[in-house]
Amino acid sequence: MMNFVVKTIANAAALAVAIWLVSGITLTGDSTGKQALTLILVALVLGVVNFLVKPVVKLLTLPLFILTLGLFTLVVNALMLLLTSWLADVLDLSFHVEGFWTAVLGGLIISIVSWAMNVVLPDGRDA
């Protein structure tokens, strides 16, 4: 349970940084509280997408990962971010990613920030 909470916080922080740095990634809301709640919900959606969809996509595209020495990860991360944006729209969450190249940059930022957050935040296994 603790690991799930930590990963959601890391995803939310990484999404916040991507929203702040990339003009094509937007999150809107009437108030700061509504924006924070939307950010947490989008982080949960991203977590579910990364847990359920990403492994299947990585398995199906394994030859491309090998051929590109892992650089295809950028494309997969971008696709997961675009899927999250689409699901957020379906769920009426005010989060949007504008285009593939924006998603590539956003996915790169999210990967770096969430990695750093997971290094810094405790995950419950240290105890």
Image (tube, helix red, strand yellow):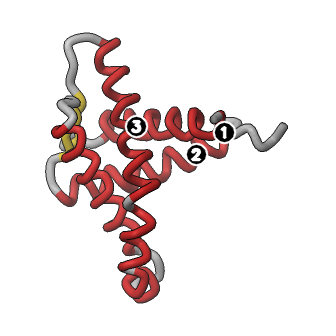
Residue type, numbered disc 1: Val
Q: Which residue does the image show at 65% across and 34% down from the upper left?
A: 2
Separation of marks 3 and 1 at Cα, in angstroms: 18 Å
> Which disc is residue 120 wearing?
1
Of the two numbered discs 3 and 1 on the same chain, state the one appearing first in sequence: 3
Reading the image, the residue beneath label 2 is 116
Examine the rendered structure and indicate whether residue 35 appears above or below residue 75: above
Q: CB under 8 Å between callouts 1 and 2?
A: yes
Of the two numbered discs 3 and 2 on the same chain, state the one appearing first in sequence: 3
Examine the rendered structure and indicate whether residue 72 appears above or below residue 3: below
> Which disc is residue 61 wearing?
none
Which of pointers 3 and 2 indicates the residue nearer the eye? 3
Q: Could you say where residue 48 lies in the image, as x and y percent from the top left?
A: 41, 47
Quadrant where the C terminus lies? top right
Separation of marks 3 and 2 at Cα, in angstroms: 16 Å
Residue type, numbered disc 2: Ala
Secondary element at tag 3: helix
Secondary element at tag 1: helix
Q: Which residue does the image show at 46% across and 76% down from the upper left?
A: 70
Q: How crowded is mark 1: few (under 14 residues within 10 Å), some or many (20 or more)?
A: few
Q: How crowded is mark 3: few (under 14 residues within 10 Å), some or many (20 or more)?
A: many
Reading the image, the residue beneath label 3 is 43
In the displayed structure image, the side of residue 97 where residue 10 appears, left or right: right
Residue in front for this viewpoint, 50 or 98:
50
Q: Could you say where residue 89 lies in the image, as x and y percent from the top left?
A: 17, 38
Q: Which residue does the image show at 23% across and 44% down from the upper left?
A: 87
Quadrant where the N terminus lies? top right
